Amino acid sequence: MKRTALSTAILLAMTPALAHAQDAPETDAQTLDTVQVTATRVTQTVDQTLSSVTVIDREEIERLQPKQFTDLLEGRAGIETSQNSAFGKNTSVFTRGTSSDHTLLLIDGVRMGSATSGGASWQFLPPEEIERVEVVRGPRTSIYGSDAIGGVVQVFTREGRKGPPKVNAFVGGGSFNTWEAGVGVAGGTENTNYSFSVSHFETDGINVQDDVGEDDRDGYDNTSLATKVSHRLDNGIEFFGSLLYSEGTTEFDSGSAFSPDSSDFVHAALRGGLRIPVTQRWDTEFAVGHSRDESENFLDGEFFSQFDTRRDMVDWRNDIEIGDRVYLIAGVDAHEDRVESDTAYDEDSRYNVGAYTVMQLDLGRYDLEGSLRHDDNEQFGSKTTGQLALGMQASEAIRLRTSYGTAFKAPTFNDLYFPGFGNLELEPEDSRTLEVGGRYTRGAYYADLAIFRTELDQMISFDPVASRAENIDEARIQGVELEGGYETSRWVSRASLTFLDAEDRETGNELRRRSPLTARVDLDRSFQRFSVGGSIIAKSRAYEDAANEDRLPGYGLVNLRASYQLAPEWQLQATVNNVFDKDYETARGYNNPGRAAFVKLRYQQR
């Protein structure tokens, strides 16, 4: 299967380029105009950054027609996901082979994630409320603090632009008795931009596990609201605010009287603040934020357990231009985590204060970037991390880069305080990462190559001898990422390939659920009103267990899609996922959907 998936991926990626090379002058490469802010907290084009970055914009989201957020990430360069079945079930995102809680999730700048488990609730993110996704691979602890060992994924909600109010709406449905609907409005004036939208997704789902619990479908519903507003005064001061709020219910199978079979959840991010142009070369921003990751769990309709975590945040950032060649970012941020649960934790709150600085130097053909951060945590004390990156413009089309950075991950409340499991003597997980890469951009083409190596110490695992969490593991993760694309007015092609070697240094075994090879190809062709496209996602085998005795087979999936522009404001979309009805698992014992078809009608006021 590996050879077939790779050959197909390369062929599909190259076919439009070879057949339509004459189309290249019709459009610039998307990456020339694509900007991102996650890598350094300041706006840069993807070509300018010294990081490995992937940007997924609203146009691509609508073209791919995802049913869940991980549909956008799976198989991208350096990204692999694992799910306990589909539609609102527990989900892990592995960036460059690091643990799922080593990838920091931001929503409009708000830190997300459960303070008890440590991981983010990727499964509850609503694709219809998302304007853009930025994926930064590699350590970013020296900018954002704990958790960003593997990288950062930042989700930006829908936003308005200057112009009269424009309404967008959709309704759709399909397999598993799935239906969805939503409506929004966005617009702006000379000084004010605004956006507001609501959406609902509901499905009967599939049977999550065979021979566990009841042999029936385990459903999921999610109602989401998103709003974003900004207003600039005549003196340049800008006020801004954003909110993404989701709530619903997800069902799963319970194997005993000691585990729940459904959960009511709340997943929310709120942020507001102001930006002040102090001088022509100095801008300052002050923001406060609040996030929630809450679950109330049930068994046979009766209350079972509650895990509510809330995080309050404050951030003061300064952007300063020093001459024409030096750019400085400096700031202070703080957050407090709080836990409310029927489980008796020894501590139910803790704070973290961090000071950070980023400096960028333009040296003509060369660029130098350094970042340094110091964190003071109420539980484990102080931690200092840093990163240094060098870029070189080797030619008009080729830009080379190299970087070295340190990072850490703080122990979670479960690691520290969970009854019978927690260990107050735990130290943060530490990492060191070296990366060398390059990017080629010419006309409608781009390609990005990165080679990386991460050494991870003090990994936190459960020690069966001590019957508690311990700093016992060390890991070495190395790999190669290749990403490329081609875009004209008629063709859009994206391809990515990742080779990964993730080894537990204590045993020599592979880290669980990490595939040595992943690949993805997205290819779309437009014909005036009509467009067709497809995606191939392939993964080699992985191991479910740390002993490497339980092998998860590799697999390849084919998804097809089409759309038709009924009128300037109306579009009909259709997709068939898992066309060949493959049986596969990303976590042992958890089913994934077979062949499934969906349709959607969109309205976008012009």
Image: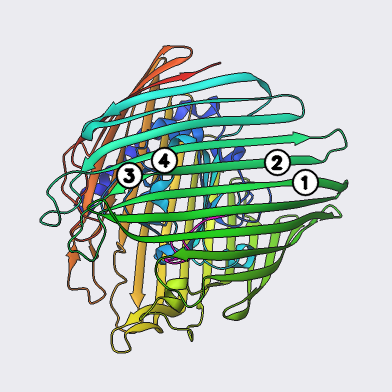
Lower sequence index among marks 2 and 3? 3
Viewer can see residue 83? no
What residue sits 34% from the left and 38% below the top?
67
Front one among 563 and 429: 429
Front one among 310 and 552: 310
Lower sequence index among marks 4 and 3? 3
Assess disc 3: are there few (<14), some (14-19) or many (≥20) residues with their C-alpha within 10 Å of its C-alpha: some
Assess disc 4: are there few (<14), some (14-19) or many (≥20) residues with their C-alpha within 10 Å of its C-alpha: many
Kind of residue indicated by mark 4: Arg
Q: For mark 2, what is the residue?
A: 240
Q: Compute the Cα span from label 1 to label 3.
A: 46 Å
Lower sequence index among marks 1 and 3? 3
Q: Is residue 369 left or right of residue 509?
A: right
Q: Is residue 462 left or right of residue 47?
A: left
Q: For mark 3, what is the residue?
A: 10
Q: For mark 1, what is the residue?
A: 275
Q: Residue 103: image x %, image y %?
A: 47, 61
Q: Are marks 2 and 1 in contact (CB under 8 Å)?
A: yes
Q: Secondary structure at mark 1?
A: strand
Viewer can see residue 532? yes
What residue sits 48% from the left and 59% below the top?
113
